[in-house]
Structure formats: C-alpha cells, structure tokens
Image: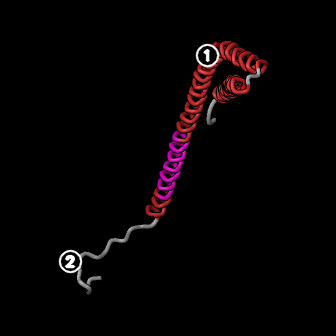
Amino acid sequence: MAASRALRRLLRIRDIEEEQSRLALESALSQLNRLEHALAATAERDRRGRRLVDASARTGELPDRLAGLEETRAAGRHAAALAPRIGDAELGVAARRREFLLKRVERRQAETLIQEAEARDAVEAGRREQQALDDWFRNRLHREEAQAEPSASATPRTTPPSSDQTAEET
C-alpha cells in the first residue's frame, strides 16, 4: 500500500481546490485588466477632447470646443468612477493570489505526505526483501550442513597408519 486512500483523496481535493482558486485568480485578473483598459480608453477620450478643444481654438468653431470640453469632462467623470473599482479589483486580485498560493502549498504538502509514505513503504519493502534473501541463504547453508553431517557419520573413518609402524608390520 503506497499511500492510504485518504491521503490520495486529500490530494485530489487539494488539487481541485487549487484549480478553482487558480480560475478565480484568472477571473479577477481578467476583470482588473478590463478596468485598466477602460481607464486607458478614458485617457484616450480625454486626449481626443483636448485635441478637439485645441483645434476649435484655431478654427473658432464653438460647437467643436463645447464638444471637446464635454468629452474631457466625461472622461474625468469616467476616470473618477473607475479609480475606486480598480482599487477594489487590485485588492481582490491580491486576495485571490494569496488564496491560490495557500491552496498550492496545501496541495504540495499533501503530495509530500504521499511521497514520504511511498518512500517509507519502499524502504520497508527493501528491508523485507533483504530479510527474505537472508533467511533463504541461512536456510540453504543449514540444509547443506544437515546433508553433509549424515554422510560424514555414515562412512567409517579409517585411521592412517602411525609412524611407529613400519612397512613390514603392516
């Protein structure tokens, strides 16, 4: 058993939570990006209004000047309305980023637990395997010794002639 089912289930849950948190972060970043683009468009609207006022000052066209002033004023109101929304969106992005990073840490912790359990299991399996090999070798040596003993006791031992005996006596 490499890692318990509960740990694997926990990892799946952490992985799903991290994915949801990542999607929430991407959504918040997308919203912030849209607001920043709207602010950039507002700045462009302000520049167009100023150019219109500048051009009307040279030509003397009063409607162009009034339109330019109104464009500039509308751009200012729009920028003033966007500023707090951008601030809130930035705070939201920061919160989503912290949440995402926390979920990532939690997932990695679950992965680490599983990896440690698998490593412990691998070490234990190695020990069991080595123990089985040691037992097999020990049993083999014991069998060989047991088989050698009966054959050694079954054959009578002949004593070699002593050195005191001469060749003639034998």
Between 32 and 80, the residue placed more toward the observer is 80
Residue 154 lies in the magenta stretch: no
Between 136 and 77, the residue placed more toward the observer is 77
> Residue 5 at x, y = what percent?
67, 28
Compared with residue 164, is residue 46 higher up or lower down, i.e. above or below?
above
- Which quadrant holds the N terminus? top right
Range of the magenta residues? 123-144
Secondary structure type for disc 1: helix
Location of residue 27 by image quarter: top right
Compared with residue 163, is residue 21 higher up or lower down, i.e. above or below?
above
Total marks drawn? 2
The amino acid pointed to by label 1 is Gly
- Please report the residue visible at 49 percent of the width from the left and 53 percent of the height from the top: 137
The amino acid pointed to by label 2 is Asp
- Please report the residue visible at 60 percent of the width from the left and 17 percent of the height from the top: 91
Q: CA distance from mark 1 to mark 2?
A: 117 Å
Q: Give the label on residue 119, or none.
A: none
From the viewer's perspective, is the residue at label 1 or at label 2 nearer?
Answer: 1
Within-10-Å neighbours for mark 1: few <14, some 14–19, many 20+: few
Between 66 and 92, the residue placed more toward the observer is 66
Compared with residue 12, is residue 79 higher up or lower down, i.e. above or below?
above
Q: Main secondary structure of the magenta part?
A: helix
Secondary structure type for disc 2: loop
- Please report the residue visible at 73 percent of the width from the left and 23 percent of the height from the top: 60
- Please report the residue visible at 45 percent of the width from the left and 59 percent of the height from the top: 149
Residue at the far right: name it. Answer: 63
Q: Which residue is mark 2?
A: 164
Q: Which residue is mark 1?
A: 87
> Residue 39 at x, y = what percent?
67, 23
Location of residue 15 by image quarter: top right
> Residue 162 at x, y = what percent?
25, 75
